[in-house]
Image (spheres, rainbow, N blue to C red):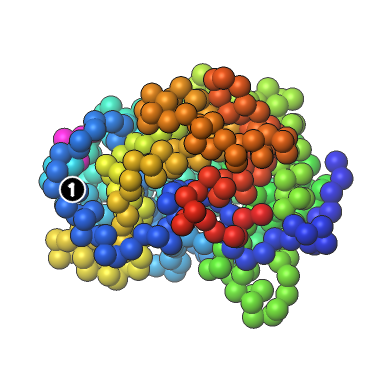
Amino acid sequence: MSATSSGGTNGEATTVGNYFVSNYPPYSFWNAQAAEQAVVTLDHPPSVEGPFGLYLHIPFCRKRCRFCYFKVYTDNDSSEITRYLEGVAKELTLYSNKPAVCGRKPKFIYFGGGTPSYISTQQLSRLVNAIQPLFPWDEAEEITFECEPGTITKHKLEILRDIGVTRLSLGIENFDDEILEVNGRAHGSREIDRAYGFAHDTGFPQINIDLIAGMVGETDANWEKCVRKSIALQPDSITIYQMELPPNTVISKEMRINGQPAPVADWRTKRHWTGYAFAEFEKAGYTLTSGYTAVRDTATATFLYRDLLWSGADMLGIGVSSFGHLQGVHIQNEHHMQPYLEAVEDGEIPIRRALPTTADERMIREFILQMKKGRVDKLYFQSKFGVDLQDRFGTALEELRQRGQVEIDSASVTLTREGLLRVDQLLHRFFLPRHRVTNAA
């Protein structure tokens, strides 16, 4: 394997901006004026009964990574964390009385962060005891819990298993101590080995590990070691994200202050590293299920949170700054801790901004998100939306076909490996003209 480990002389330098497409229409079009309409939506029973899930944001971390762009808090004491978790329980209580979600049982639950595993076992148990009477998860097929290796104990994992967690996701990111430190990660390689051993011995149905291609200091040789170590662990799934630098990261702020280019690999190199990893995973028996994830056994290593959300499922986003999607309305909570807590403690649902979507926007949303899985079923869109994908997106699809990035037949649109490795940079061409941005290459 050979690739440059940094730089941007080939025209694909990593610059400050968001490339990863996680929703549609883009968040910049969501607005406070629509928040009232979102509240009205809650007062009506669902017009379409479909899958329903919960996302619970636990925004606390031991430290903030230099590349992190999520809403996280560090150095909080136990009382502050307890108050927040009580606020989460109050928000859930407020929602549980609303016709749009009353009586609906979640099919999937996702504890995300921040670092959910940062909270104590007592705090975790109290949170779970508050959730289950409001939204019983006896019918949940998947409960995912994100963990930072340095916050894991065997006892905490046993509690997670006992409350029903089916998918444990370990944020490893890299195996090299120096790279972890320079990127601001709180854990080291010893904690990775210990945490994975505990997780394996505890017996979760599925263990996922996360890696990041292109962290500060990454090299060809070290990335090869990361790939080998990942395969040696034999996790049920491995997720790789290519490093990007949204404006609110520490690295991005330092770049603006110092007037320097990004200290991370360019996009061509990151695609090269990700492609190398995927090829090695496939040699080891893994199968790609998206542009980010390889799984060891497709019969058992599922990811319902992704698959159902990308197919239009309703999801309540609970907690500060959380995003949700309910009956065609996008919703985001209050972005800062104090306004969030004041709202729920006053008995108000803490919506900060929202966006009702049209049927056409919902179709586009599902199409671009499912493109990230590598294959889109034409019949699905014909049956659900009455849309012929080639009629609707013919020009853009043909352009990608000629560039060798998609293959098209009567049944599907399938991304080639080249297309899959840069899928987020391809999706903007399918946006409605008013939603297009110029940040993606």
Task: Judge whether residue 404 is colored magenta.
Answer: no
Query: Which secondary structure dominates the residues rendered in magenta?
Result: loop
x and y, in percent, of residue 144 in the image: 42, 38
Which residue does the image show at 44% across and 42% down from the upper left? 365
Query: 359 or 299: nearer the eye?
Result: 359
Image quarter in which the C terminus is found: bottom right
Query: 227 or 255: nearer the eye?
Result: 255
Regarding residue 190, the answer to whether it shows in the image is no
x and y, in percent, of residue 183 in the image: 65, 62
x and y, in percent, of residue 353 in the image: 31, 61
Check disc 1 and give the amino acid type.
Leu
Image quarter in which the N terminus is found: top right
Compared to residue 141, the image places residue 272 above or below, namely below
The quadrant holding residue 243 is bottom right
Which residue does the image show at 19% across and 48% down from the upper left? 41
User: Residue under circle 1?
Assistant: 42
Task: Judge whether residue 102 is colored magenta.
Answer: yes
Regarding residue 405, the answer to whether it shows in the image is yes
Q: How many marks?
A: 1
Compared to residue 385, the image places residue 59 above or below, namely below
Compared to residue 254, the image places residue 56 above or below, namely above
Residue 173 left/right relative to 106: right
Q: Which residues are magenta?
A: 101-105
Which residue does the image show at 33% across and 63% down from the upper left? 31
Query: 408 or 394: nearer the eye?
Result: 394
Query: 121 or 174: nearer the eye?
Result: 174
Tell me if mark 1 has few (under 14), some (14-19) or many (20+) residues whose alpha carbon lies within 10 angstroms of its own: some
Compared to residue 14, the image places residue 148 above or below, namely above
Which residue does the image show at 57% across and 19% down from the upper left? 410
Q: Is disc 1 placed on a helix, strand or loop? A: helix
